[in-house]
Amino acid sequence: MSLKQADDHTQCRAMSDVLNRVGDKWSVMIVGRLGDQTLRFSEIRRSIGTISQRMLTLTLRNLERDGLVTRTVYPEVPPRVEYALTPLGQSLRKPINALWDWSVDHYEDITAARADYDADQDEAAKPIRRPYAGREAQG
Amino acid sequence: MSLKQADDHTQCRAMSDVLNRVGDKWSVMIVGRLGDQTLRFSEIRRSIGTISQRMLTLTLRNLERDGLVTRTVYPEVPPRVEYALTPLGQSLRKPINALWDWSVDHYEDITAARADYDADQDEAAKPIRRPYAGREAQG
DNA sequence: CAGGATCCAAATAGATACTG
DNA sequence: CAGTATCTATTTGGATCCTG
């Protein structure tokens, strides 16, 4: 049976499961970097710049486990390992790009909203400052 | 200047910032539950079922800060607080739904890939089992 | 009812050192 | 080069108790 006819609860499981992958810190970036090319471990690492080698390994393993990337080991010295998106990984690029576009289109709205919110918070957090300045000067 | 002409690095900041919100455990679920309705705190909580009141509060605060939901307090006893999506929050539903659809469409592929991967791992982790059974019986 | 405050457990991320 | 192993710091999530 297809999930499309499944109940809401089951669909939610699917969604949150996918979000666990897509929503982690590096997966989307790696999928974006791979695009339709094949890249080596160190190429991915350099193209991202700030990812630790441990996190890159973990993230690639998870993507591989979920069937989104292939990992090809060439038995050479020094070793060479190449990563590429599977067709399934490719198909994820479209909804990810939709989210990417939304981010770019609305990011300024978000930062503006945050600035407003934080300004209000700061205002509310201020010590009460009444227009009265005689008491302690006299005491 | 629009972010659309910004460099890749700046766009990445926007994207990962958005993913930090969208990718957390509850935000997408809340946005989905709100849809185009207005809901009270306890209604959201019940409709999700398993979220703790602390996480619901925190998530709603973050969504409010980012300008995605409005929070309306009615000065009554007992208190009533209503939440609804802003236009910005509404606009997020579309890319989120795209991702939702992808999840539903490909979730079985993912679970199958995981099963394969895990089976291979188990296989590799097994103690070596050669088709040879004479040595220790004779020694 | 809505949510603030606290404490605790678990997941996640980074730095570092080592290896085939 | 492409990892693995280990240790630690930070983040996150949940349980519980308390309040206007």
Image: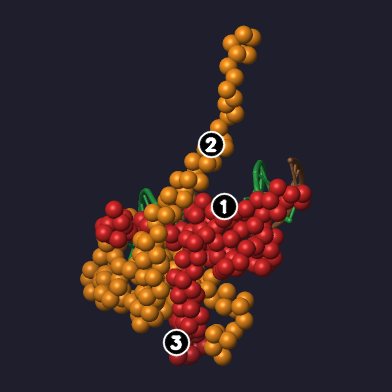
Chain colours: A orange, B red, C green, D brown
Residue B1 makes an appearance in the image: yes
Q: Give neighbour class at mark 3: few <14, some 14-19, many 20+ (Cα, 10 Å).
A: few
Distance from disc 2 to disc 3, alpha carbons, whole Å, reads 74 Å
Frontmost of labels 1 and 2 is 2
Q: Nearer the viewer, residue A87 or D10?
A: A87
Amino acid at pointer 3 = Arg
Residue at position x 64%, y 9% from top? A139
- Report the disc number at residue A127: none
Residue on which disc 2 sits: A123
Residue B63, given in percent of the width and then of the height, sits at: 53, 56
Badge 1 sits on which subunit? B
Residue B47, given in percent of the width and then of the height, sits at: 67, 68
Amino acid at pointer 2 = Glu
Share a chain, discs 1 and 3? yes
Amino acid at pointer 1 = Arg
Residue on which disc 3 sits: B130
Badge 2 sits on which subunit? A
Residue C8, given in percent of the width and then of the height, sits at: 66, 50
- Report the disc number at residue B61: 1
